[in-house]
Amino acid sequence: MWYRMRVWFGWRLGSGGGPDERLSAFIDGELDDRSREDMAAEIALDRGICVQVQRLRMTEDLAHSALQPPSTPNPDVCAEHVLALATADTGEVAAATSPSNSRVPTAVLASVGLLLTAGVAFVGLRRRGLV
C-alpha cells in the first residue's frame, strides 16, 4: 500500500532512502534480506524507531479498514438479539398486535356513529312526511 502511495504521489524509494522511506519499505516487505535484517536491528535498538514503526503500522491498518466495505448485519442474529432483549424484562414474549387489530375499535365506533346518524335522519324525514 505504501508503495502505491509513493508511486501515486511521485515519491521514490532511493537506494539509501530517508528513515521514513526505509521504515515504510520495511513494513511493506519491500526490502531485501540484508536491508530487512539491518532495519530490524535498528528497530530493536532504538525505541523512537520502534514507536514510529508502530504508528506507521497503525496508520496502514486504519487505511485498510477505511477502504473495506461496511459489513451488513445478519437479520436472523439481529432478530434473536431483539427478542432476547424483549424477553429479558418480562420473561415472556409480548403478544404482537397487528395494525388491523388496533383499528377494529375505531372502525366499529365509526360504523355505529354512521348508523345512528342515518337512523336519526330517517326518523326526522319520516316525521316531516318526506319518506
Image (cartoon, rainbow, N blue to C red):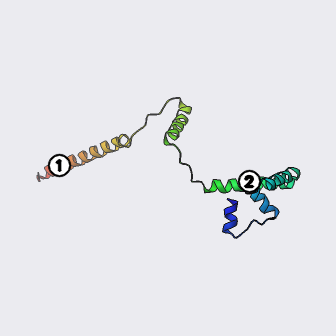
Q: Which residue is mark 1?
A: 122
Question: Residue 42: percent from the left, percent from the top?
Answer: 86, 54
Is 35 or 121 nearer to us in this picture? 35
In the picture, the quarter occupied by the N terminus is bottom right
Q: Earlier in the sequence, mark 1 or mark 2?
A: 2
Residue type at numbered disc 1? Phe
Q: Residue at x 36, y 40 (%)?
A: 101
Is 68 or 40 nearer to us in this picture? 40
Q: Residue at x 85, y 49 (%)?
A: 44
Please state which of the two labelled residues, at mark 1 or mark 2, is closer to the viewer: 2
Q: Which residue is mark 2?
A: 57
Is 15 or 66 nearer to us in this picture? 15
Dot 2: element: helix
Residue 98 sits above or below residue 44 on the image: above
Q: How many marks?
A: 2
Question: Residue 38: percent from the left, percent from the top?
Answer: 84, 54
| Left or right of residue 104, residue 27 in this image | right
Question: Residue 93: percent from the left, percent from the top?
Answer: 48, 32
